[in-house]
Image (cartoon, rainbow, N blue to C red):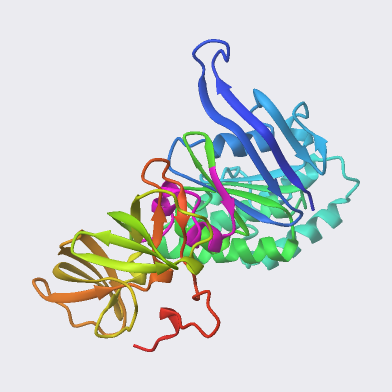
Amino acid sequence: MTHLELDSVKKVFGDPEKEGVVAVNDLDIDVPDGDFLVLLGPSGCGKTTTLRMIGGLEDPTEGEVRFDGTVVNDVKARNRDVAMVFQDFALYPHMTVRENLGFGLRRENNDMTGTEIDERVTEVAEMLEIEELLNNKPAQLSGGQKQRVALGRAIIREPRLFLFDEPLANLDAKLRKTMRTEIDELQSEVGITSAYVTHNQEEAMTIADKIAILNDGELQQLGTPDQVFNEPANLFVAQFVGSPDMNLFQGALSERGDSYRIEMDAASFDIPKRLVDTEIDTDEVLVGFRPQDLYQARTRATNGPEFDTQVRVVEPVGTEAIVHGTSALGDVTAKVGRFHDLEPEDQMELTIAPEHVYLFDPTTESLLKGRLVTERAEGGTSADSVEA
């Protein structure tokens, strides 16, 4: 296992003294031994460039990449002992699965005999359940089978690091879910430190130990999936992580004893100060409601705002529905549970518990209050614990 560190890493394409393009700027990331890091962000945010600098395919303009405390900036890619898995699988078409899996071992000077290599190939093939495909060539394989072979080729070398560059992008939705579970299980089993690039926040939330969220080459937040969802560092993170998108409204804030009073169009409510980690010194806020935290007022008792909403569109998702509506606050999206019976043009009253409300500074867009799973009060009752 390897402790991976990126210390003030910067990458500029072109002349850094002139008008070079800054792809990654002042990036600090610490990945402990055996952790699964996901680099998450929109296209062009610098996540693949970061992965390539870790792998030695790009040289940092500034800063250091360290493996177990040793700077590897000047170490060539082939000498870093990392294994990369790409979205296009990168298999040798003229070789069988057996030959593809064993190629790296046969190329290296590792003192392994042919018999030992064959045994290792069989072991990895059995782990990935592709042993019956060993004599097939890539053209005879499905997308999922090709991805398993690509994973096997990385695993078989037992490298210091696994690097995944959007490995599931070319698979259909069902297979992506299956393969991301398998990747997560395999990484846990072999215990090798890994970095994984994706723009898919569902993938990131599912498999990551830590998520590094990037935008325009800047690190927005490094944290666990729970942290980036419940306590996003800023508005960008809050809007990028979570589906459906967060509802955002303008609000005015004032202090009332032990509470903050939030006034919005057609709705107002109090947030106890015990629910807020930082002192708020602004009188204007952005108020965020995640769709899954909104409830029909008739099913939940909360101390939060209540507002009437006219249903425009209902998107059934099994026993739930994503409901888009219009309210006095503005357009609103809610994820309604249980066996919904809503139709377009219906009226419903929505509410949300104060502990689930997000607050952001409208100027800096930094987080003022995140989502709490349980209310911070002795004997307090959270909306999460109230039966519908």
Which residue sits at x=31%, y=68%? 269
In this picture, residue 225 sits left or right of residue 60: left
Magenta range is 220-243
- Who is closer to the viewer here, 78 or 284? 284
- Who is closer to the viewer here, 117 or 298? 298
In this picture, residue 166 sits left or right of residue 99: left
Which residue sits at x=47%, y=34%? 216
Pick out the residue farthest to the left: 345
Which residue sits at x=53%, y=74%? 376
Q: Position of residue 119 (x, y in %)?
A: 80, 61
Q: Position of residue 29 (x, y in %)?
A: 66, 43
Pick out the residue farthest to the front: 257
Q: Position of residue 324 (x, y in %)?
A: 20, 64
Q: Position of residue 237 (x, y in %)?
A: 45, 50
Pick out the residue farthest to the right: 111
Q: Considering only vertical position in the picture, is 250 above or below 174?
A: above
Q: Which image quadrant is residue 338 in?
A: bottom left
If the image is split into quadrants, where does the C terminus sit? bottom left
In this picture, residue 181 sits left or right of residue 343: right
Which residue sits at x=42%, y=46%? 236
Q: Considering only vertical position in the picture, is 121 above or below 16?
A: below
Q: Is residue 144 visible?
A: no
- Who is closer to the viewer here, 53 or 321? 321
Q: Considering only vertical position in the picture, is 200 above or below 387?
A: above
- Who is closer to the viewer here, 23 or 170? 23
